[in-house]
């Protein structure tokens, strides 16, 4: 379907709207991803973590991929942080997950037609573009600096997600904000660009398109929705209750990480300042403590600064077409139908 907000990105992926659900690990996002894809955007299945029993985690990811495919017949993506090995290549945990993704596609032709996009983040995806293309997949990579975008495109990436410092979870070490970063990246590369960070409605989508982006990616906004039943209700309440200044950065698993200011965040920050940094495994455990157990004081609540402007739960199926209509109206284009 050709909508007024059709872009190079929507045409590349075969989706209706230039609206993407961010990778949101280490949490389950299968049902949320299905809802976003079914509504005409691109949903993303996230990995459950990068430490611990990786074989069990890979099985969990496989289950989420299959669950998402059962709930929608539309395209969706999987997001895998790639980290780095001691030799500078892709980390071992990433290879485990990538192998599981490819195995799932090879074993189910119908699923393979839906799982079209491999998204990578948190490191340089050495050799992954070629691997994805050999398997009939598109590859998009998340960056926080223009030089990283250029490097990923030279390596074969089909699209770039340009992430600003205001985003939730792992943020770019460069410290760049979306309104500066995205035009720089859009001017430097020829593949589609997705803006990630600070968008919650059609105004943000319209602004992103004016900045040179071809789509936007939302995490915090989609987390606070009625289509996210895999997360504890307390997590959504924490997002809705967050105001300006209630977020902060701490040293995460892959660099700076934006979280809610709470007891857990204070403890991690204090430990880092004292030279006894919290391990990656402990940080992921604290993240899942908030998401699964609902302990939003003793666990790490990942959220973006955009939470300060979010006060209600949304229905994804209603929200995405409405967001596109709002952006089209602001840009002076014909109305978008759902």
Image (tube, rainbow, N blue to C red):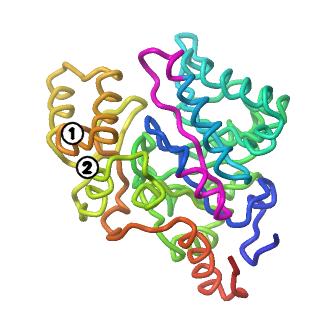
Q: Who's the residue at 30% across and 65% down the image?
A: 308
CB contact under 8 Å: marks 1 and 2: yes
Q: Earlier in the sequence, mark 1 or mark 2?
A: 2
Real-space CA distance between mark 1 and mark 2, rounded to the nearest whole angstrom: 7 Å
Task: Tell me which corner region of the image, top left, top right, bottom left or bottom right, holds residue 300.
Answer: top left
Above or below 248: residue 119: above
Which residue lies at the image location 24% right of the left edge and 38% below the top edge?
299
Give percent across and percent down for residue 289: 28, 35
Q: Is residue 73 magenta?
A: no
Q: Is residue 140 visible?
A: yes
Q: Nearer the viewer, residue 148 or 311?
A: 311
Residue with the most extreme front position: 70
Would you call the spot at circle 1 few (<14 residues within 10 Å), some (14-19), or many (20 or more)? many
Residue 213 visible somewhere in the drawing: no
Binning the other alpha carbons within 10 Å of mark 2 as few (below 14), some (14 to 19) or many (20 upward) gives: many
From the viewer's perspective, is 40 left or right of 172?
A: right
- The quarter of the image holding the N terminus is bottom right
Residue that appears at 71% across and 48% down? 159
Q: Position of residue 133 (x, y in %)?
A: 82, 33
Residue 109 appears at what percent x and percent y? 83, 35
Residue at disc 2, secondary structure: strand
In the rendered view of the protein, which quadrant contains the C terminus?
A: bottom right
User: Which secondary structure, mark 1?
Assistant: helix
Tell whether position 37 is magenta. Answer: yes
The residue located at (73%, 87%) in the rendering is 334
Identify which residue, 211 or 279, lies in the foreground: 279
The part of the chain drawn in magenta is 32-57
The x, y position of residue 185, in whole percent, is 63, 53
**Which residue corresponds to mark 1?**
265
Find residue 260 and name its label. 2
């Amino acid at each position: 379907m050709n909508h007024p907000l059709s872009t190079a990105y929507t045409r590349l992926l075969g989706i209706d709207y230039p609206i993407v659900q961010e990778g949101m690990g280490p949490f389950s996002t299968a049902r949320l991803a299905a809802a976003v894809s079914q509504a005409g955007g691109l949903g993303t299945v996230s990995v459950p973590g990068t430490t611990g029993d990786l074989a069990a985690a890979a099985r969990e990811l496989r289950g989420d991929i299959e669950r998402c495919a059962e709930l929608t017949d539309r395209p969706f993506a999987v997001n895998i942080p790639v980290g780095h090995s001691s030799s500078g290549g892709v980390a071992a945990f990433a290879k485990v997950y990538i192998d599981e993704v490819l195995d799932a596609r090879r074993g189910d032709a119908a699923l393979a037609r839906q799982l079209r996009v491999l998204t990578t983040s948190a490191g340089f995806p050495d050799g992954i573009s070629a691997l994805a293309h050999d398997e009939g997949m598109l590859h998009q990579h998340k960056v926080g600096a223009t030089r990283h975008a250029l490097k990923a495109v030279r390596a074969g990436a089909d699209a770039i997600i340009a992430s600003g410092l205001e985003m939730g979870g792992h943020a770019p070490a460069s410290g760049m904000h979306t309104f500066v970063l995205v035009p720089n990246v859009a001017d430097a590369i020829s593949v589609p660009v997705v803006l990630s960070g600070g968008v919650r409605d059609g105004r943000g989508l319209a602004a992103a398109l004016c900045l040179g982006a071809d789509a936007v990616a939302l995490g915090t906004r989609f987390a606070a929705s009625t289509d996210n039943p895999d997360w504890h209700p307390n997590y959504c309440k924490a997002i809705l209750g967050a105001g300006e200044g209630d977020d902060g950065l701490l040293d995460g698993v892959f660099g700076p990480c934006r979280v809610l200011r709470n007891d857990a965040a204070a403890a991690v920050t204090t430990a880092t300042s004292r030279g006894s940094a919290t391990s990656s495994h402990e940080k992921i455990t604290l993240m899942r403590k908030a998401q699964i157990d609902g302990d939003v004081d003793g666990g790490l609540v990942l959220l973006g600064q955009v939470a300060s402007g979010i006060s209600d739960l949304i229905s994804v199926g209603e929200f995405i077409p409405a967001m596109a209509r709002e952006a089209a109206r602001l840009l002076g284009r014909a109305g978008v139908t759902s």
